[in-house]
């Protein structure tokens, strides 16, 4: 909750700010809530959130108190509702910053806030608040990938202590992309040629091996494969070469593994065995 204090010396006016359910700032003064109704170049105009009340507060552009808010309202203040909003905002903030179960965050904040029974009655239950907080958290967490072609965000590759967490990281994911070349061979109905024709098989393997070449030599290597493929009968590889050119040569760094320390699945499989044995 942000706080600004009047420095005029005339009155000890303390302004506090909390967020609404939609993330907008609300001004808190003497137990009353105000929402921003208008902004100018150097002033903000806040009006009471109670529909029938016309009381207002004026601040400057930096939310420093200017005037208003000292006269009696047409209704009683509601500090319990404000306290409930504070707890609710803390739960949402923690849900964004950590992956602790929402039910545990809810219980901890209720316990730590030392709120009274009236505030607890106003505050939504964990079951009521859960779907909203889950949606808020979902915005900060990457969506589940829909295919094997994806990059793992850097923040999910290490533990909280900064140690390497994911061994099946983007270097190995790039190796998996190489396998898509063979999948296209199957898709285009070239399995028989791949098995029975050695020249064709060698060129396909050279195409896959481009991922192991330095990035600045990949295009040259591809052109050499294309030139050799032109010597085959019936232009067997043309459709495969066209696929590779259209989908892979436009971003070589995405799949090239020549500079990666881990270039096979053996490392990952070995670590997976160790992890499995440690769980037994």
Image (cartoon, rainbow, N blue to C red):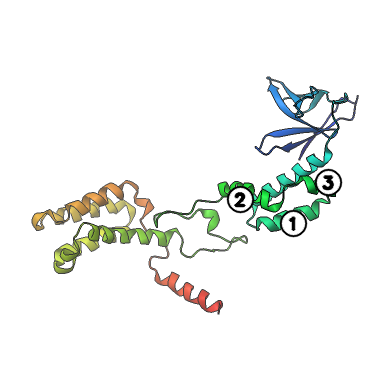
The answer to whether the residue labelled 2 contacts the one labelled 1, judged by CB atoms less than 8 Å apart, is no
Nearer to us in this view, 270 or 85: 85
Which disc, if any, is residue 134? 2
Vertical side of 85 occupied by 271: above or below = below
Front in this rendered view, residue 247 or 37 = 37
Select label 3 or label 2 by which is in front: 3
**Above or below: residue 11 compared with residue 2:** above
Name the residue beneath numbered marker 3: 118
Q: Which residue is mark 1?
A: 107
| Neighbourhood count class around disc 1 (C-alpha, 10 Å): few under 14, some 14–19, many 20 upward | few
Please name which of the two marks, 3 or 1, marks the residue nearer to the observer. Answer: 3
Neighbour tally class for label 3: few under 14, some 14-19, many 20 plus, Cα within 10 Å: few
Q: In the structure shown, which secondary structural element does the residue marked by tag 1 occupy?
A: helix
- Image location of residue 29, percent across then percent down: 82, 32
Q: Secondary structure at mark 2?
A: helix
Q: Answer with mark 2 or mark 1, whichever residue precedes in sequence.
A: 1
Task: Tell me residue 35's x, y (percent).
Answer: 73, 29
The quadrant the C terminus occupies is bottom right
| Residue at the image position 72 percent from the left and 46 percent from the top | 88
Q: Is 155 situated left or right of 81 in this image?
A: left
The part of the image, by quadrant, that contains residue 106 is: bottom right
Please rate how many residues cluster around mark 2, counting C-alpha atoms within 10 Å: few if below 14, some from 14 to 19, many from 20.
some
Query: How far apart are labels 3 and 1 at the CA level?
Result: 17 Å
Residue visible at 56% across and 46% down in the picture: 139
Q: Residue furthest right?
A: 10
């Amino acid at each position: 909750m942000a706080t600004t204090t009047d420095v005029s010396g005339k009155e000890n006016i303390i302004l506090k700010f909390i967020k609404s359910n939609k993330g907008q700032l609300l001004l808190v003064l003497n137990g009353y809530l105000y929402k921003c109704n208008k902004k100018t170049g150097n002033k903000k105009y806040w009006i009471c959130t109670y529909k029938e009340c016309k009381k207002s507060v004026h601040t400057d552009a930096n939310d420093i108190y200017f005037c208003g808010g000292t006269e009696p309202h047409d209704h009683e203040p509601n500090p319990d509702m404000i306290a409930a909003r504070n707890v609710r905002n803390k739960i949402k903030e923690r849900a964004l910053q950590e992956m602790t179960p929402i039910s545990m965050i809810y219980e901890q904040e209720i316990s730590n806030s030392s709120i009274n029974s009236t505030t607890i009655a106003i505050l939504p239950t964990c079951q009521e608040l859960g779907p909203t907080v889950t949606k808020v958290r979902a915005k900060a967490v990457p969506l589940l990938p829909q295919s094997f072609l994806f990059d793992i965000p850097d923040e999910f590759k290490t533990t909280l202590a900064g140690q390497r967490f994911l061994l099946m990281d983007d270097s190995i994911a790039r190796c998996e992309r190489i396998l898509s070349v063979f999948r296209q061979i199957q898709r285009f109905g070239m399995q028989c040629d791949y098995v029975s024709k050695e020249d064709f098989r060698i060129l396909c393997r050279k195409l896959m091996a481009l991922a192991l070449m330095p990035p600045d030599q990949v295009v040259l290597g591809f052109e050499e494969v294309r030139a050799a493929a032109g010597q085959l009968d019936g232009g067997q590889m043309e459709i495969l070469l066209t696929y590779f050119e259209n989908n892979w040569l436009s971003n070589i760094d995405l799949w090239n593994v020549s500079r990666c320390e881990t270039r096979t699945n053996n490392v990952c499989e070995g670590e997976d065995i160790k992890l499995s044995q440690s769980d037994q």
